[in-house]
Image (spheres, rainbow, N blue to C red):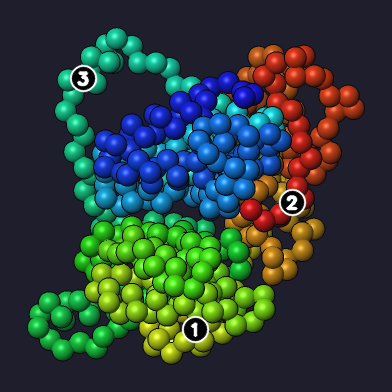
Amino acid sequence: MSSVGGTSLKDALAALLTVAGRAGVSEDTARAEALSLAAALAESAPGAPADWAAVTPGATTQDFFDAAVRGRRWRGSPTAVLIELVAQGSPEKVAYAEALAEVASASCSLGEPTMRVIGNASVAAAAQLQAAGARPLQVGSTPPAPTTTEKKTEEVVAPEAAEPERSVEELLAELDELTGLEKVKREVHRQVAVLRVEKLRTDAGLKSPTITRHLVFVGNPGTGKTTVARLVSGIYKALGLLSKGQLVEVDRSELVAGYLGQTATKTAEVVASAAGGVLFIDEAYSLTSGDQGTDQYGREAVDTLVKEMEDRRDDLVVIVAGYPEPMETFIAANPGLASRFRTTIGFEDYTDAELTDILTGLAEAADYELTESALTHFQVVLESTPRGRSFGNGRFARNTLEAAIGRHAWRLRDVTAPTTEQLRQILPEDLTDEDLHPPAAPSTAEVGTELVSEELPEQGEQA
């Protein structure tokens, strides 16, 4: 297995499972999540499937790519387990985020190291650490070992108490700090006010109309739907409408099985895992219309979902998301859906200024800085980029940063002792789509652990 320094995936996985055990997280759940994250980050690296399978007994190349598909959603956002630990105020949330960051760093050792993987890993690690309020960790580096004094201190200090849960006001303030999404913010505030009064009336013994809490999010990719769903789950928990407040994000592949009859069981298990929190179903319309029209497997999942929503109506919220027109068709496909999803929130595309803010924020979270000239060049890139239905919005900004981090690493390949400023600064040339293959690439023996470049995807390519 090749390496770019730092921890191997095997060691990073072992460290993560240790933290998971302290946090009360199932070992199987933590392992599957970490392996999916690593696969998603290293997906483009030649030879990565074989190295990944080496720490996954019995796994095949197809297992690697299946795991990568599941893990792509965590390339720019916290994993499901970390979300739950943060929602619980777990004292292990920072340690778990740091362990995930090490998994991200270790993904760079899978197969032949590439610039794209370095960029993916940097952004993913920053997302985990930021979600838990932890310090940034340079991808590919290993934290210094604790001194003897630090070790003794760790042995005698009592476990950290769980942090107090965040209030509705704190969560709404975090929502308001998000870039753009003004209409979304107003609608969430309105929904919170209605649900709060409904609960107060119920607690006071007054009659109150039953208001459905389930939501439909419509908009193009990368417009913040998952981020807002995560905040909604915490807000509903703070309002006392949900017992746990975790977010479980799934798509069709995680609800539908290969045979009729199995889908009902699979869907019921997924819903059970979301009980007490929010079940977020992305591209939900894929459940009711496949490539050949009517999809009996997807419809079985929908029928099961409607039943589970009724059975768990007091402690479950479902948010379905996707493009506007297909979502209208999806809701109309089943009377049970139409009666339960009455509130639709539209997510508009980001403006150029908002995308620039998003890119800057992502860079800062990963401990990089875009120079003024780089930001000016990004404006030029935005102006020349088509804004069709498949435009990635926030994902476009994330993909741009990931690619820039890779080019930044290649630009510094021959700098023996780069300054801190050089290590942090993203320049205009890092935002270009040039072919970065050298005329004659040196052999692995010649470069040691230096990065080997790859052909980067075009700007705006979807994750």
Question: Label 3 near label 2: C-beta < 8 Å?
Answer: no
Which mark, by number, is residue 459? 2
Q: Residue at x 48, y 28 (%)?
A: 10
Looking at the rendered structure, the secondary structure element under dot 2 is: loop
User: Which residue is depicted at the point 23% across and 62% down?
Assistant: 243
Q: In the image, what residue occupies the spot 35% across and 16% down?
A: 146
Can residue 183 be seen here? The reply is: no
> Which mark sits nearer the N-terminus, 2 or 3?
3
Judge left or right: residue 375 versus residue 321: right
SS at circle 3: helix
Visible residue check, residue 52: yes
Q: Position of residue 28 (x, y in %)?
A: 38, 43
The amino acid on which the numbered mark 2 sits, given as a three-letter code, is Gln
Q: Does the CB distance between marks 1 and 3 fall below 8 Å?
A: no
- Of the pair 411 and 437, the residue shown nearer to us: 437
Q: Which residue is mark 1?
A: 331
Q: CA distance from mark 2 to mark 1?
A: 34 Å
The N terminus lies in quadrant: top right
Q: Earlier in the sequence, mark 2 or mark 1?
A: 1
